[in-house]
Image: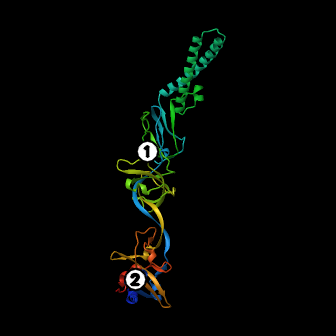
Amino acid sequence: MKPSIILLLLIFANLNSSCGDSSETSTEDKNKSDAGHITLSHQQFKSAELQLGTPEFKKFSEQFEVTGIIDVPPKNRASVTAYFDGYVTQTELLVGDEVKKGDVLVKLKHPNFIKIQQNYVEALSNLEYLKSEFDRKQSLYEDDVIAQKVFQSTKNQFLNAKAQLASAKEQIKLMNLSPAQVAQGNFTSEINILAPISGKVSKLNVAQGKFIAKSDMIMEILDVDHVHLELEVFEKDLLNINKGDTLSFMIPEVTNQKFEAYVRLIGAEISQNRRVRVHAHPINENVNFKVGMFVNASLKTNEKKIIALPEEAFTSLDDQTFILQLDEKTSNTYQFSKLKIKSSVPQNGYKPILNADELNLKAQYLTKGVFDLITNSGGGHSH
C-alpha cells in the first residue's frame, strides 16, 4: 500500500463529524449541517500535503468542437507550369527542397524557341522600315503630295507592325529571355522555368527528357511561413462565432499539445453539407506545422468572468459536487465543512462555482486532497 494512502487512512480514523444546532439557518449554514464536518490536526494537514486557497474570478467561455486542416493562402501556393511546350533538359530538385523566388527550377528545350526569337527580330526590323516609311509619307501627305488613302494605308501597316512587335516581345519575356539580347542575335533553344514564389517543393512531376506540355503541372511550391487553419463549422454554431474569437487546437495524429489561434475570417456561404468555412491564424507561427495536417479545434465564445476554484478543490459523490470550506483554524486543528455546490466543466485547471452567492467568498477552501478526504471519510454523518 502506498505511504500517502496509509497516511490518509490514519487521518480518516481521527475525523469527527457534527451537526448544526440551529433549526433556522442560512443557506450556507444549511449546507454545513447537511454535509457534516471534518476535523484534522495540524500534523495531519501537513503530512498529507493539503493546501488552502480562496475563490477568485477566472475567465470561462462556451466551447464547441470543430475539425479542419492546416493550409496556406492561395498566394502562398504556386502551381508551376510552362507557357511553351518543351523537353526537360535539366532538373535537380526534390520534394522538400527550398527555393527562392526567381531560382531556376527546370530547363526546357524545343526548336520552336528559335522560331519565336526569329519572329521577334523580324518584327523589330519590319517596324523600323515601316516607321521610316510612315514618317516619309506623313510629310508628303501634309504637303498635299499624296492622297489621304495612300497615307492611311501606310499608317495602318505601321500600327499593325507595332502591335506584332509588342506581341513578339511579350513572348520573349514569357520565355524568361532578354529582348535586348535576342535583338542582337543571341538566340537559344533552351529556356529557364523560374520559381514564382519562395517556399518548398511539395509536388514534382518532371524527369530528365520528359516532354512538358503547356497545360502540364511541372511542380508545386508552398510558402509555409504563414499557415492557417481551414475549419468547417456547422450551421447551428455559426452565430456563436465572431472575428477575433480565440480557439485552441491540437493535431491528434502528431501530438496532444494544444496550440492557440484566433478567428480571422468567416465564410459567407453555407455549403451543401450545412457547414461554413472559418479561417483562423495560429498565434505562434514558429511551430513546424505541415500543410494538410488534420486538426481538432475547440472554439471559445461568450467569455465571462466567474468565481472559481482549482479543479482539485471539487469532488463528486452520488451526482452531487462538493467542496471543503475551512470554518476554523485553532492552535491544534483545522475544521472543515462539506458544502454542496453547482459547477460545470473545468477550463484551464479551474472549475466555476455557479452558486457563488451562497458561499462565503472570503473564506478559505481546501484545494488539494479533497477527493480522498471526502470519499474515504464518508463526509461525516448528517441529519
Judging depth in this view, the residue of 10 and 217 nearest the camera is 10
Name the residue tied to disc 1: 203
Q: Quadrant of residue 351?
A: bottom left
Image vertical order of residue 324 relative to residue 248, above or below: below
What amino acid is at disc 2?
Lys
Image vertical order of residue 201 relative to residue 61, above or below: above
Q: Is residue 270 left or right of residue 179?
A: left
Label disc, if present, on residue 30 of the rendered structure: 2
Residue at (51, 35) in percent of width and height: 192
Residue at (61, 16) in percent of width and height: 134
Q: What residue occupies the far top of the structure in this picture?
A: 145
Judging depth in this view, the residue of 276 and 228 nearest the camera is 276
Residue 4 visible in rendering = no
Judging depth in this view, the residue of 329 and 194 nearest the camera is 329
Residue at (57, 20) in percent of width and height: 159
Q: Earlier in the sequence, mark 1 or mark 2?
A: 2
Judging depth in this view, the residue of 170 and 160 nearest the camera is 160
Residue 140 screen position, x and y as percent: 65, 11
Residue 376 screen position, x and y as percent: 36, 83
Residue 56 screen position, x and y as percent: 50, 73
Label 2, residues with CA under 10 Å away: few <14, some 14-19, many ≥20 = some
